[in-house]
Amino acid sequence: MLPAKCLRLVPLQRRNLIPTLLFCAISGSVLYLNSYLTFSTLFGGDKIYRSGRWWVDKLPSSLLSFKNHSSLIHTEQPRVRHFPHCLVIGASKAGTRAVLEFINMHPHVVRPINEVHFFDKSHNYKKGYRWYLHQMPESLPHQITVEKTAMYYAVSDVPFRVHQMNSSIRLILVVREPFSRALSDYLHMRVSYNNRGLKYESFENMAVDEKTGNLDLDFYAIQRSQYHHHLWRWMEYFPLSQIHITDGDILRTEPWTEMQKIQTFLGLQEFYNSSLFFFDKSRKFYCIKKETIACLQKSKGRKHPTVDKTVAEKLRAYFRKENEKFFNLTGRRFPW
């Protein structure tokens, strides 16, 4: 709500701008503009957008009192589509959906509701950037756009394609204990098949080569948990400073701490704290506090199948070696 003394000028002409601003400075009122003005042109100053309002910086000394006492200048801003400022690239079943929903709480972030699969699916990529842009939500000037497709991380062509579009884009990678991630990945596919009335092989049969008894390293659930292998490909195109690694295990137990790190990485205003989250004891997941409690879909947090002890130990031993490569590559250790 604007003050009673506020002026609304539609449109505001340059020739009467200075007298109007002087009047506002004297009267202590706020000026509401329904036109687009470049104050750097008018005043030789800067135009800065903050929290949905225009602030005039470096005003001439003649308008100093206006800047100090009534510096809010409102303008009606159009919503437009932007290419993503940041991609949540994976890893699948590590907590990427939680990151997307939690980051969407921030008032300065917008995101597509569904995964776009632009860079990983060639039939979408061939549709071009205009199609991709149309998949993005409209946003205000103070908001950034974040897109999440969890398969980006593990598809070999994606880093090059992303780099071609925007070499300075920010990337978020979510990782969790790799054996648990592999089980979640397998369970997700098994449920998908079962819901269509189809049978699905056991985890053990898919994880172990029947002829040799060795692990099948091409099994998708194992392959996607080879974090260093995929990250190395991304680092051929992007420096590690552009890739923020989120601990999916901590995200599950203390989401606000990981979200605070993400907001810093994206240069967002401080927003996240523990009061924004509610722990659902029955689902063993944190939910979002809005006007009501909003939780992730019921498919999250499914109970993992019991895996044969011999197979489980083979996998854990394998991942211990793989994890060291990931730790060395990132310069960061995880408690796996």
Image (cartoon, rainbow, N blue to C red):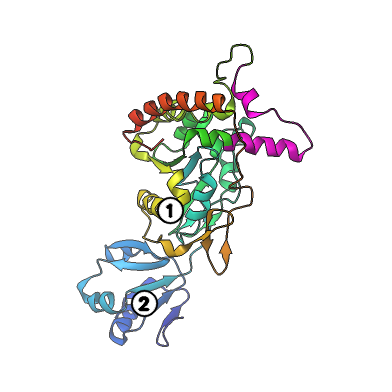
Where residue 186 sits, quadrant-wise, is top right
- Residue furthest left in the image: 61
| In the image, residue 303 above or below residue 53 | above
Quarter containing the C terminus: top left
Label 2, label 1: how far apart the Cα atoms are: 55 Å
Res. 254 mark: 1
Q: Is residue 308 magenta?
A: no
Residue shown at 56% from the left, 45% from the top: 133
Instruction: Name the mark nearer the viewer: 2 or 1.
Output: 1
Residue lying furthest right: 197
Q: Quadrant of residue 69?
A: bottom left
- The 10 Å Cα crowd at callout 1, few under 14, some 14 to 19, many 20 or more, is some
| Residue found farthest to the front | 309
Residue position marked by numbered label 2 in the rendering? 16
The local secondary structure at tag 2 comes to helix
Helix, strand or loop under label 1: loop
Left or right: residue 135 compared with residue 327: right
Residue 102 vs residue 155, the one in the foreground: 102
* Label at residue 336: none
Q: How many marks?
A: 2
Question: Over which residues does the magenta segment extend?
Answer: 184-209
Q: Nearer the viewer, residue 226 or 153?
A: 226
105 displayed left or right of 54:
right
Q: Residue at left 51%, top 41%?
A: 94
Of residue 284 and residue 26, the one placed in the foreground of this image is 284
Q: Is residue 194 magenta?
A: yes
Task: Locate residue 293, reporting x and y percent.
Answer: 56, 64
Quick one: label 2 or label 1, which is nearer the N terminus? 2
* Horizontal and vertical percent position of residue 138: 55, 56
Left or right? Give the position of 264 relative to 112.
left
Answer left or right for 177 relative to 60: right
